[in-house]
Image (cartoon, helix red, strand yellow):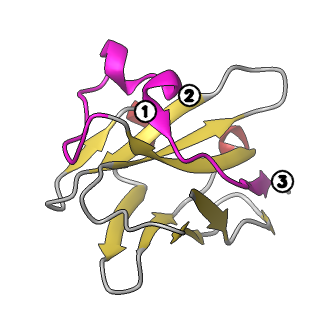
Amino acid sequence: VQLQASGGGVVQPGESLRLSCTASGFTMKWHGVGWFRQAPGKEREGVVCMSSDGAVTYWEDSAKGRFTVSRDHAKETVYLQMNNLKPEDTALYHCATNRYGGKCPPANSDRSRPAHFASWGRGTLVTVSS
């Protein structure tokens, strides 16, 4: 019962990547799904979350206007489209399900912290470098 993130790679500043988050062993369509990242030497932080009804909550201000989230229930997959990537986006990206249901918690709330998310699986590394 895990979510597997994929699609990372090495890109130059200004380029784009699309990450995928796929469920294994369960259905995630009733869960809010959060994207998190952890840069070297830093704590894991929340980036953005998509509720089961498609509502999007941005946790990281720098993601607004550059990152978009979508989901395909039939494929049990949530996508993170990242445009205009910057070196500071370099990190290991994970996705996880909200322990408390379909709605995503607001930014800067206690429940937006990684501890309140589950089904962590393999992350995908994004490196933005010229």
The image position of residue 129, as x and y in percent, is: 83, 53
Nearer-the-camera pick, 114 or 58? 114
Q: Residue at x 83, y 21 (%)?
A: 41
**Residue 129, disc:** 3
Q: Which mark is residue 8?
A: none
Amino acid found under the numbered disc labelled 1: Glu
What amino acid is at disc 3?
Answer: Ser
Residue 65 at x, y percent in the picture: 34, 52
Q: Estimate the spatial distance between the alpha carbons at disc 1 and disc 2, rounded to whole Å.
A: 8 Å
Q: Earlier in the sequence, mark 1 or mark 3?
A: 1
Q: Which residues are magenta?
A: 100-129
Quarter holding residue 103? top left
- Graded by Cα atoms within 10 Å as few (under 14), some (14 to 19) or many (20 or more), the crowding at tag 1 reads some
Name the residue beneath numbered marker 2: 45
Tags 1 and 2 in contact by the CB under 8 Å rule? yes
Direction from residue 16 to residue 106 in the image, left or right: left
Tell me, yes or no, if residue 108 can be seen here: no
Badge 2 element = strand
Residue most toward the top? 110
Give the label, 1 or 2, closer to the camera: 2
